[in-house]
Amino acid sequence: MNGNYLIEFSYLLASILFIYGLKGLSHPKSARRGMNSAALGMLVAIVGTLLHHDIINYTWIIVGLLIGGLIGAAMSIWMPMTAMPQRTALSHAFGALAASLVGISEYYQHIVAEGGTVDRFKMIALGFEVLFGSLTVTGSLLAFVKLQELMRGTPVTYKGQNFINVTLFAAAAVIFIYLIYDPTQSVLFYVMVALSFLFGILLVLPIGSADMPVVMSLMNSYAGLASAATGFAIGNNVLIIAGTLDGFSGFILSILMCKAMNRSVTNVLFGAFGSVSTDTGPGVEGVMREVGADDVAVQLAYARQVVFVPGYGMATAQAQHAVRELAEVLQHKGVNVKYAIHPVAGRMPGHMNVLLAEANVPYSALYELEQINPEMQATDVAVVIGANDVVNPDARDNPKSPIAGMPIIEVDRAHNVVVLKRGKGKGFSGLENPLFFKPNTGMLYGDAKSSLSKLAQAVQQA
Amino acid sequence: MCVLALAEGSSMSATALMASLYVFALAAFLGYQVISRVPPLLHTPLMSATNAISAISVVGSILTAGGNYSNVSKLLGFIAVTSAMINVVGGFMITDRMLKMFKEKIGGEKGGKEDRH
């Protein structure tokens, strides 16, 4: 019995360290120390568990720990920072897979192998575990495929999509309720697992790349809830605590991302944004003014304040280092340089911040939407790097626009705007952007990275 | 009440169930408080950090993989240990790699003339 107390105590310690670790993330200065203690908590919990007297054979445990540890270490060492959204999507899949498999394994052991039954409470917990777990596995894998651009990022839609999804979900729910009253129907259990695997795919199929930050946050949340459900199923408090923390973190992020797009979670999941071309009010008139790097360089060199607005285009072009080089050249000329970060810029929450941090941009130069907008009128040049919807003035001015009400970075209020864009096409959402047609906007076409390098050279000579 | 009714007649005692629900409710409340304070600057590290922490399911996987279970259950447990461990090691390492990059000011350069609020 003493051994068990020791294990329980290791779990308690781990829980405290996890919470302390997350608390550290409230500031970049305390973040690393916090995460080190969380990692220590994980170690304590794992070592504690290895002492459990129910364990009769360590072979598979050790092999699993080693293989998993090696893969995890390799992934984190060699993965480029630009691939962060894909890695995160994959890790949601791994986490959910673990939770889901533990649930299936428990069920199989008690019902099929031992021919017994499980009590209702445990069945409820197991049900939630495999439902959340399985749909997160396939949903996250599909998100990975879309982010890695193994398939097109545009929404996949078909007739009756929402009807099929709702029916599928209802079917899984009905089976779940039936199982609560009769857990021994193992065939039904497998059908439920299969349905939730399928549901995960169908849920993410209609979601476009621009909405990925919401999907990532939701999957983060579901993976956590699956872990929490595992905790209920095996009566383990540290699992409940850690899973709930993850679940709530993902939930809060989902809400923040939705707010930043002025949409509801339901609308993101079932709206198939970007696939429908509805009446968006009067079309945009005018011509886009193309500018050359030399003209832009002169504007930049004589500006008092320049604001860079990065978007997903900066990530695809891997232009974060080129941005910082240009910023440095400008700062040497006495220009005040700031970066404006929209919450949904990029493919996951905080995506732009990480890329700029990687390029050695100090975080004191990064500004949030609410901080930078009042300064826009005093900004001489706003440089938009591969961002589109987050600077679309239609969101503010045109109530008929599909993105109406979405908070934007108001670059159009700056004296001059320069938009770095690959080509003349529309953005991921397929929306026309009136910003590009404004008289004070210049379009600088080409690969963002080489455009920025050209600008840096030209500014130096100016 | 509904949950209690479901637990009735099962081997799980209502006290144990209530204890679990208490833990869940308190963790949810605490999580909300702690995570609301994380600035948007650190949202990507937050996601990878919570992901690493929820890989605590490795604990459940270990007991499944090494317990007195059938071979099928043990195999599933083994896969679960492996995938959870990918997140434990990978998650904490990548979070640290990211957090290392965040610097307030770069030495000798004029980055960020004004303080953020």
Image (cartoon, rainbow, N blue to C red):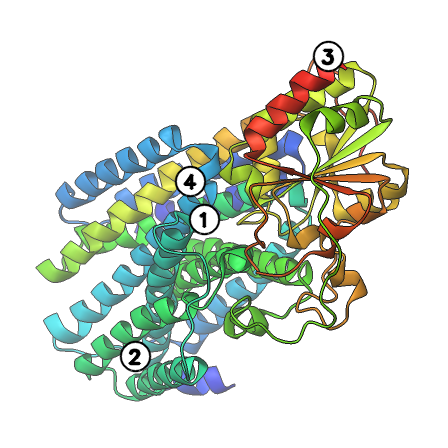
Find disc 4 in the rendering and name its residue.
B91
Give the chain of mark 4. Answer: B
The answer to whether one can see residue A197 in this image is yes
**Residue occupying the far front of the picture:** A287
Give a yes or no on whether discs 2 and 1 share a subunit.
no
Dots 1 and 4: beta carbons under 8 Å? yes
Find disc 1 in the rendering and name its residue.
B51
Give the chain of mark 2. Answer: A
The structure residue drawn at horizontal position 90% and vertical position 37%, both measured from the top left corner, is A378
Q: Secondary structure at mark 1?
A: helix
Q: Amino acid at mark 4?
A: Gly
For this rendering, which residue is in front, A208 or A200?
A208
Using the rendered view, name the quadrant where residue A384 is placed. Answer: top right
Q: Amino acid at mark 1?
A: Asn
Give the chain of mark 1. Answer: B
The structure residue drawn at horizontal position 42% and vertical position 65%, both measured from the top left corner, is A204
Query: How far apart are the alpha carbons under marks 3 and 2?
Result: 77 Å
Query: How far apart are the alpha carbons under marks 1 and 3?
Result: 48 Å
Find disc 3 in the rendering and name its residue.
A461
Find disc 2 in the rendering and name its residue.
A119
